[in-house]
Image (spheres, rainbow, N blue to C red):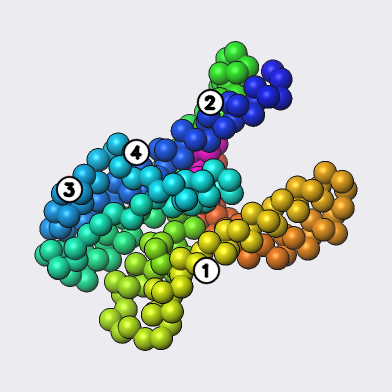
């Protein structure tokens, strides 16, 4: 199979995995908010598995380019919750919990593809392998990424639900969190470009420096290693 065909198959698999992961994430927010007594997601047509209702263009582009991004936040009205703090907290946690559970579910499909898909035609096997790999990887990375306490990510909303005070740090993160987030993503993307360049030309000093400077990349590696360990340990017990 030629390199261009591999790249096309990889891009298609990546895009489809992004569609699945983002849609399930946002649907979880909408479903939990609705179950907690808020009809706002349903009124805004977000209580659906239709991915077109959930996409944010910039977040989708970031996800495609660097492997993590975001979707349109689900609109809610916390005043409708039967129990205000509980409803706010459960709704904020719903997306990352959904992604983590999906990572548990998608991991065995990746392992089954690796162990039992070798007899398939090469393009089909490669697509299934990349698709299941991206489903698992994106689910886990999106879970970790959204735990950052920066607006408009879930981590900020979890802090918002748990914290009754609205001090200077809260107001700073609420006002500038979006711009900090874009900076971290851009900085990570630039570092990755230099890492690829250094790897291609054997400049491993550049690779080391860029890896150390990649703030978001370091956080993502640390978080995915921690949260990915129970998944690997569980499915590693299965005699494939």
Is residue 57 a member of the stretch shown in magenta?
A: no
Q: Main secondary structure of the magenta part?
A: helix
Q: CA distance from mark 1 to mark 4?
A: 27 Å
Asked whether 129 or 55 is in front, the reply is 55
Q: CA distance from mark 2 to mark 1?
A: 36 Å
For image coordinates 50% across by 41% down, the residue present is: 136
Left or right: 215 in relation to 208: left
Instruction: Give the numbered dot on residue 51.
Output: 4
Asked whether 229 or 144 is in front, the reply is 144
Identify the residue position indicated by label 3 in the image: 42
Residue 201 x, y percent position in the rendering = 87, 46
As drawn, 109 above or below 104: above
Q: Earlier in the sequence, mark 4 or mark 2?
A: 4
For marks 2 and 1, give the one nearer the viewer: 1
Identify the residue position indicated by label 1 in the image: 180
Q: Secondary structure at mark 3?
A: helix
Instruction: Give the numbered dot on residue 128.
Output: 2
Q: Secondary structure at mark 1?
A: helix
Residue 230 x, y percent position in the rendering = 50, 52
State the extent of the magenta-drawn residues as a range. 133-138
10 Å neighbourhood of mark 1: few (<14), some, or many (≥20)?
A: some
Residue 187 x, y percent position in the rendering = 64, 61
Q: Are marks 2 and 1 in contact (CB under 8 Å)?
A: no
- What count of labels does the image hold? 4
Q: CA distance from mark 3 to mark 1?
A: 31 Å
């Amino acid at each position: 199979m030629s390199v261009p065909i591999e790249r096309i198959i990889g891009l298609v698999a990546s895009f489809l995995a992004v569609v699945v992961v983002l849609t399930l994430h946002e649907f979880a927010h909408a479903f939990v908010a609705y179950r907690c007594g808020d009809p706002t997601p349903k009124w805004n047509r977000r209580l659906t598995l239709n991915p077109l209702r959930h996409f944010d263009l910039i977040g989708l582009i970031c996800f495609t380019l660097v492997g993590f991004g975001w979707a349109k936040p689900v609109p809610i009205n916390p005043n409708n919750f039967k129990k205000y703090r509980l409803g706010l907290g459960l709704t904020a946690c719903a997306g990352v919990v959904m992604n983590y559970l999906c990572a548990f579910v998608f991991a065995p499909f990746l392992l089954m593809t690796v162990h039992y898909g070798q007899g398939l035609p090469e393009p089909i096997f490669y697509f299934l392998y990349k698709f299941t790999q991206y489903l698992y990887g994106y689910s886990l990375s999106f879970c970790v990424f959204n735990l950052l306490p920066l607006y408009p990510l879930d981590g900020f909303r979890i802090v918002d639900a748990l914290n009754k005070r609205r001090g200077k740090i809260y107001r700073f993160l609420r006002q500038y969190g979006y711009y900090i987030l874009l900076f971290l993503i851009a900085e990570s993307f630039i570092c990755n470009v230099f890492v690829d360049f250094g790897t291609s030309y054997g400049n491993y000093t550049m690779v080391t420096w860029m890896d150390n400077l990649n703030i978001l990349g370091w956080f993502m590696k640390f978080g995915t290693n921690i949260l990915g360990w129970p998944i690997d340990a569980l499915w590693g017990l299965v005699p494939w």
